[in-house]
Each structure stands twice: as structure tokens, then as C-alpha cells.
Amino acid sequence: MNFSLSKKVALVTGSSRGLGRGVAMSLGKAGAKVALNYLNDRESAEKTLGDLQAEGVRAMLVRADASDPEQVSAMVEAVEEKFGRLDVLVPNATPDQPQKPIEEYDADFYRQMYEFFVLSPYHLARAVLPGMKERKCGRIINITSEVFHCSVPEFSAYVAAKGGQIGWSRSMASELAPFGITVNTVAPGWIPTERHENDPQEAKDAYLETVPLGRWGTPEDVGNAVAYFSSDEASFITGQTLCVNGGRTPW
């Protein structure tokens, strides 16, 4: 079954490249109008915009810091002004996540992780919920990570923030269900994208050996999961986390 999102408008933060680009492309190919968000990499954002438009997708580009509440509000207003509504929200923007022992982190980095993965979805939800509640329908799909489920060591700040993001999503799922709004999370495994180009090959090889399906995931795999949660066919599913990692977390 091909899920049709032809009457939906989606906003994907951090969608100029990587997983965000894959999500935006999947939503667009399913028929949604797509608002792309970027902060620094305008060249990649314009390329993604062009690729969507080449597929016949109505799309727009919005520059905003997804962790800044004022910029988030302005971004949502711009999308709603352009497309008339906003049905699907995908908080995906992310900073770098260095992996190192807890003694080498500082409190400011912990705060940065919290701001991106808990406060940013909060600011975005506050901005989109008036319209979703009025229409009694909406989809919020947070992009989390398998790191919370796998208890990855030397990643404490990122794991803690992703755990908070999953907990926030579950609470919001219960709170927003009476309004016809579902909140789910997609938790990818390690999916090499542009920002992983310099990662050690031995680390990549070791990870791949732990993937039961025996292949790397792709941004499109993540995008397809998001497209499903965005669809009418998923209207009775909320508060769930779908791990897209080839079977590394089968429970």
C-alpha cells in the first residue's frame, strides 16, 4: 500500500541533508506539501528544494533556528501563510553529538542536548497545536535514536536527551489524543550520512556486523516510517517508538 499524503502539509526541521532530507523526500513523494527548514547550509537546502520540485512536490524553504522559540513561531506562521495549514510536524534538527567519557562533557553541552531534543519539540508543538486542535487532527513525529534503547556508553548527554524526548512524546500522545493528534517517534540506528564521512571505517564495519538484516539503513528507510505515521492509516497509533535499525532492538 502506498500511503497518500496528498492533502497534508508537513514541516521537517533540519531537512537540508541527511536524515531530514530523506524524511522530506519521502513525505513529498507520498503527496504532501513540504516545508524544508535549515539554519546554516543554504546550498544543500536549495538542492533538496530543487529535488523535491523536480518530483512535482510543492515545497518551500524556511531558514530558522529550531531551538529558538521566536524563530520557531515565525517559521510556523510562514508555513501556514504559504500553504494554509500545517498537518505534520517532524522535529529532526540536531547538533553534533561527540562520543566521549562523562568526565569530558560539561554542563553547557548537556544543556545544548536538552535544548535541541526536548525544548525544540516543545517550542514547535506550542506553535503548531492551535491549528491542529482546531482541525481535530495532526501528526507529530519526533526523530529520536536507538541510543536510548541500546544504552550506548560514552554518549551520556545525547542518550539522556533522547530519553527525555521519548518520554515527552509519550506524555504528549496521551494529552493530545482527545484532539485527534497523534505523537510518535522514529528511532533510527546508525545511518551514515554526510556528517559521518570522516568516521573511522573500522567503527562502521563493527557496527554493521551487529545489524541482523546485514545492511546499512538509508534516510529513505527513516522517511518511509515517518510517512506511515503521518498517514490516515496510522490514525489509531500514538505514543509509540518505531526503531528503524535492521533488527538491533527487536523487542
Image (cartoon, grey):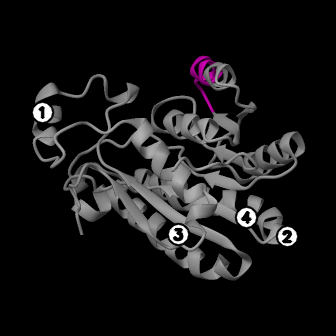
Q: What stretch is highlighted in magenta?
A: 39-48
Element marked by disc 2? helix
Quick check: marks 2 and 3 in contact, CB under 8 Å? no
Q: Residue tagged by mark 4?
A: 126
User: Which mark identifies residue 134?
Assistant: 2
Q: Earlier in the sequence, mark 1 or mark 3?
A: 3
Query: Viewer-nearest of labels 2 and 3?
Result: 2
80 relative to 188 in the view: left or right? right
Query: Viewer-nearest of labels 1 and 4?
Result: 1
Was residue 47 drawn as part of the magenta stretch in this picture? yes
| Tag 4: amino acid | Arg
Residue 242 location, quadrant: bottom left
Q: Distance between the residues labelled 4 and 3?
A: 13 Å
Residue 71: x percent and y percent?
A: 75, 45
Residue 197 location, quadrant: top left
Q: Distance between the residues labelled 1 and 3?
A: 33 Å
Q: Distance between the residues labelled 2 and 3?
A: 20 Å
Query: Viewer-nearest of labels 1 and 2?
Result: 2
Residue 68: x percent and y percent?
A: 68, 49
Quick check: marks 1 and 4 in contact, CB under 8 Å? no
| Tag 3: amino acid | Ser
Q: Residue tagged by mark 3?
A: 169
Q: Distance between the residues labelled 1 and 4?
A: 41 Å
| Tag 1: amino acid | Asp
Q: Earlier in the sequence, mark 4 or mark 3?
A: 4
Magenta: main secondary structure equals helix
Which residue is at the front of the view, 70 or 32? 32
Mark 1 neighbour class, 10 Å CA radius: few under 14, some 14 to 19, many 20 or more: few
Residue at left 49%, top 35%? 22
